[in-house]
Amino acid sequence: MSYMRIIERIKEMEDISRKVKNKGKKVGLVPTMGALHEGHFRLIDVAKKHTDFVVVSIFVNPLQFGVSEDLRAYPRDVHNDAKLLKKKGIDILFAPLGNEMYPEGYDAYVELPMLSSVLCGARRPGHFKGVCTVVCKLFNIVIPDIAVFGEKDAQQLIIIKKMVKDLNLGIKILTAPTTRESDGVAISSRNIYLSSQERRDAPVIYQSLILAKKLIEKGERDTKKIKEKMRVIISSKLTARVDYMDIVKKKDLKQISFLESEVLIAVAVWFGKTRLIDNITLQIPEI
């Protein structure tokens, strides 16, 4: 079991990163909000493979939670997370203090309005403004060469890649596939909120995505028809309520009526008070 440092102060984290980079080592960052699970560990594995020094951040970012969302209820167990990270052999757990990240009078934000106005962004105003702001701050503090994000949060991933490009941040973004339970449910920190019945119904999200994939493989290109059949299968579960389902161009998240090129099929479903998201990306073959 390797030695892992826990850092809370921004200045200390900055100093350590600079010293590591001055030695010619590559720094990897895996940003998280804690409540770590197998999905996070896959991201860490990618970071360890491609860098010499791995930092995992844990910060429950208040900027990305709406007024009616679950900031207070969001699962927190930094002590247990630290034990898990130590076993994974990372170098630093960076758990910055809230009053350091956002001191009194804080008034600087990062926003990508076009990509943030659709899908989850349309349902959670200000969410991606909060995500981009905290990720940009973490990039500036940790100074990583590589940062790793999961494909489950597809819109977030696309926005962060665009932010890095547009702001010339010079950080390589790597990804890891969505980690799933044996029944197809995407692993998420929010799954603990599901009742036993809701958890039994939750696989219907992935089932709807697989249905869409099969329809497309058989030649269906009308997005309206695909979404209608997806909605039927999700609505068959009494605990499920569709928040949105969209088929968009992956490169810019724009709506399409007829499939072509690379598309993102994204779904958000409420199970009681718990909102779960999932997606798949497909390269559409020519018929």
Image (cartoon, rainbow, N blue to C red):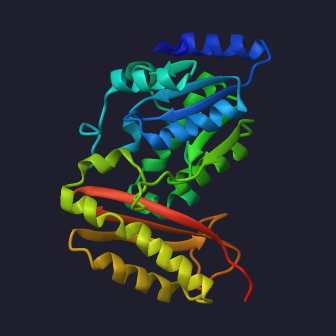
* Relative to 95, residue 43 above or below: below
Q: Is residue 175 left or right of residue 56?
A: right
In this view, the residue in front, 187 or 62, is 187
Residue 105 seen in the current view = no
In this view, the residue in front, 151 or 163, is 151
* Relative to 71, residue 100 above or below: above
Query: In percent of the image, x 66 and y 48: which residue is there?
Result: 161
Query: In percent of the image, x 49 and y 14: which residue is there?
Result: 7
In percent of width and height, residue 52 lies at 70, 23
Query: In percent of the image, x 55 and y 36: which residue is there?
Result: 135
Specify the quadrant of the image occupied by residue 90: top right
In percent of width and height, residue 19 lies at 70, 10
Residue 177 seen in the current view = yes
Q: Is residue 279 left or right of residue 28?
A: left
In percent of width and height, residue 75 lies at 29, 36
In this view, the residue in front, 1 or 17, is 1
